[in-house]
Image (cartoon, grey):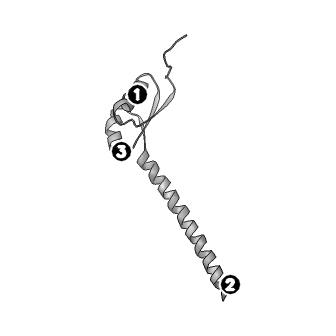
Amino acid sequence: MNDELQLDGQTVVVIGGSSGIGLATARRARDEGARVIITARDPDRLFRAVGPARAEILSDHRRRGVADAERRKQREQDDAHADRIARERVAAKD
């Protein structure tokens, strides 16, 4: 039985890969033939760290931006709904 990981053709996701163990893990996986996706909090630091590695960059910061936009949209919809209900109640009293 082979105890070595077979990464050729696999996709490896490394969270916190802009430095240290995460970056080393990403580089090792890449060297063993894996497609590597790295995430980190700081997109600039991540880009500097993995630019030469040609890894795909998914920044937590960018994902948070999308989540924030979705929450803002939901809040706006909730506010519009609350305003409509308030107007209907005021109209019903008149």
Whole-number angstrom distance, CA of label 2 to CA of label 1: 65 Å
Quadrant hosting residue 36: top left
Going by the numbered disc 1, the residue's amino acid type is Thr
Element assignment for label 3: loop
Of callouts 2 and 1, which one flags the residue occurring earlier in the amino acid sequence?
1
Residue at the farthest right position: 92
Going by the numbered disc 2, the residue's amino acid type is Ala
Quarter holding the C terminus is bottom right
Q: Which mark is residue 25?
A: 1
Going by the numbered disc 3, the residue's amino acid type is Asp
Label 2 crowd (10 A; few <14 / some 14-19 / many >=20): few
Q: Position of residue 87 (x, y in %)?
A: 61, 80
Quarter holding the N terminus is top right
Quadrant hosting residue 39: top left
> Residue shown at 36%/44% (left/top)?
43
- The residue labelled by disc 2 is 92
Q: Is residue 48 above or below residue 91?
A: above
Of callouts 3 and 2, which one flags the residue occurring earlier in the amino acid sequence?
3
Label 1 crowd (10 A; few <14 / some 14-19 / many >=20): some
On screen, residue 67 versus residue 54, left or right, reads right
- The residue labelled by disc 3 is 42
Label 3 crowd (10 A; few <14 / some 14-19 / many >=20): some
Q: Is residue 33 above or below residue 78?
A: above
Residue at the farthest bottom position: 94
